[in-house]
Amino acid sequence: MRVPRITNLFLITAGAVITVFGMRELSWLLGPFLLALMIVILVHPVYRALLRIKVPAVGALLGLLVAVYGIILGLIGIIAISAAQLATILPRYASSVAASWQFLTDQLAGLGIGSDQIRQLVGTIDLLQVARFLTGHLPSLFSAGANMIFLYSLLLFLGVESTQIRRRAASLAADHPALAAALTEFVHNTRRFLAATAVFAVIVGALDTIFLMLIDVPMAPLWGLLAAACNFIPYVGFVIGLIPPALLLLLDGNWQLMIVVIIVYIVLNSIVTTLLPAKIVGDLVGLSMTITMMSVVFWSWVLGPIGSILAVPLSLMTKAVLVDSDPKARWLAGFLNSDSRNRKQQT
């Protein structure tokens, strides 16, 4: 008996909803696993390159694992050093902060806001306490980094398993050639996406560093490096990179220049890390701009912060498994692909 189309649609929708909510409940497990998978996909060419120059298989595997853990330790180190440096220099601004708070109090009082209430509120803010808070939480930061490295011990297993990927891919291609081809394209597109993201990160970090040096912000290269690292967190990462230089300018009493920094960061983020990547990266990996941007919202809701970092690769993987590998579902590709990909497939 033929099942009505509306019934099929209902069953598919119900299955998708159950799957998504199940993934959301298991985000504590899926998030680290998927992040580890993407990192291994990114650095696996290191293993093949070492084999090509006649490095023994064991040495090539060790090189792969060093690259994998180097990425994680590098990102953790940049954020930890930035927090430590910010905590170190905050107390130097205690005197200028007092003058800035007094100026703000007078301005608000001039607008009719009670000066006694303002001073009472301002009096509760202690810059030294802020510095102590940051310093006191540095051990927690390092502890979280250590826990993450321990959690990502599965990188070790994925890295070892990846050395056998060609053999397993050949078996998959023999039984399911369409799926094998789709997954191969997913791997290539994921590497293109991560490489393009790294290029844009370097560009925005360099531009931020030059700008901050021109306006004489302390430790400008460090804040530029932080901005570059945070670029891997789509759409919200620039806010993390913006906080240190903006805060230092505010504490120095130069709130006008702080506003300029905020505006410049927003403009750079809008152009270099949002609009251009959405178009260029979308064309590079074959996803439309709308899907690229909606991916961040959806995967952030499902997997949390890790989902925002892996949004585009996860959408590429979902498309490869559910659309590109199934001839009956390929009609959906026209709505998911970028214009350049659709034109290429039509020619």
Image: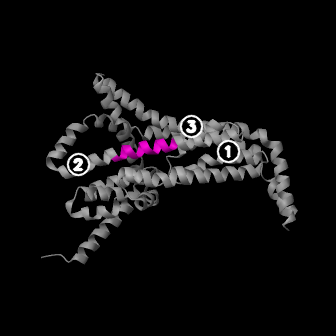
Q: Residue at x 38, y 49 (%)?
A: 284
Q: Earlier in the sequence, mark 3 or mark 2?
A: 3
Secondary structure, mark 2, is helix
Residue furthest front in the image: 347
Q: Earlier in the sequence, mark 1 or mark 2?
A: 2
> Which residues, given as a range, are shown in magenta?
189-201
> What kind of residue is marked 3?
Ile
Q: Residue at x 33, y 23 (%)?
A: 59
Q: Which mark is residue 110?
A: none
| Residue 322 visible within the image | yes
Secondary structure, mark 3, is helix
Q: Residue at x 22, y 76 (%)?
A: 5
> What kind of residue is marked 2?
Ala
- Residue marked by disc 1: 245
Residue 79 at x, y percent in the picture: 57, 40
Cα distance between the residues tagged 1 and 2? 47 Å
* Disc 3 crowd, CA 10 A, few/some/many (<14, 14-19, 20+): some
- Residue marked by disc 2: 181
> What kind of residue is marked 1?
Pro
Secondary structure, mark 1, is helix
Quadrant into which the N terminus falls: bottom left
| Image height of 235 relative to 145, above or below | below
Q: Which mark is residue 78?
A: 3
